[in-house]
Amino acid sequence: MTANLDRFHRFDWGVPPASKGDWAFLLHMLHSLRSNGRMAAVVPHGVLFRGSAEGRIRQTVIEKNLLDAVIGLPANLFYGTSIPACILVFKKNRATNDVLFIDASGKDANGNLRYRKDKNQNKLDQCHIDDIFRAYTERVDVERFAHVASFEEIAANEFNLNIPRYVDTFEEEELIDIEEVQGNIERIKAEIAVVEARWRSI
């Protein structure tokens, strides 16, 4: 398919690959919005970083200042699939050209999950939804949760929207006390030697 075959001009910014129709749906919805419209769509994370035609479409959408927010969701949230998804929020006639990134798939600053693990499926309780909504409306940086990225920052990342590039959720591993570990090994060896000596005396 080529763009000139679409009489509605939905694909003037690029033709999505036939094997991945995510951007085809998104472009259709974007071109259906009113001049002050807003929309949100749930998509797989590949939409954020896949290259080639999708990368060019993503860049154009950002350059035209249509992307308002990227909200990362935890894995195993939706029925029928365990893969993590994200919500893309688009808005026409925006007052700023930044993009808000929210990572609702990890832990807060106190180490608490931003979702609830259930028996078969993860869930977002009302408190988790409220946190996401508050971050979206307040639109400020929140450690390990939200970041307002400028157009220049996104351009420097070559229009890759992969959330970890913007929201740092890295957890430092606890340092290992080598002397304590060595002491535990020596203690265990001594206990084994005592047990073996008792065993041989039976």
Image: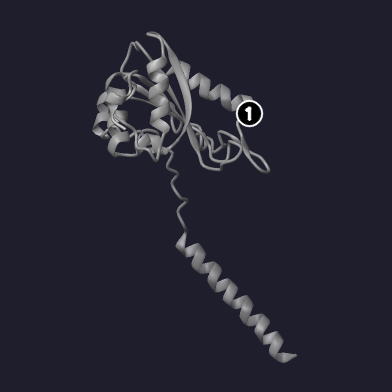
**Residue 70 drawn at (x, y percent):** 42, 27
Report the residue at 58% width, 36% height from top: 77
The residue that mark 1 highlights is 125
**Residue 188 drawn at (x, y percent):** 59, 73
- Specify whether residue 101 is in view: no
Q: Residues within 10 Å of mark 1 (few under 14, many from 20)?
A: few
Q: Nearer the viewer, residue 149 or 161?
A: 161
Q: Nearer the viewer, residue 181 or 137?
A: 137
**Residue 12 drawn at (x, y percent):** 28, 23
Report the residue at 37% width, 8% height from top: 35
Amino acid identity at mark 1? Asp
**Horizontally, is 63 left or right of 39 in the view?**
left
For the C terminus, the image quarter is bottom right
Q: Nearer the viewer, residue 90 or 170?
A: 90
For the N terminus, the image quarter is top left
Compared to 93, does 113 lie above or below? below
Report the residue at 63% width, 40% height from top: 121
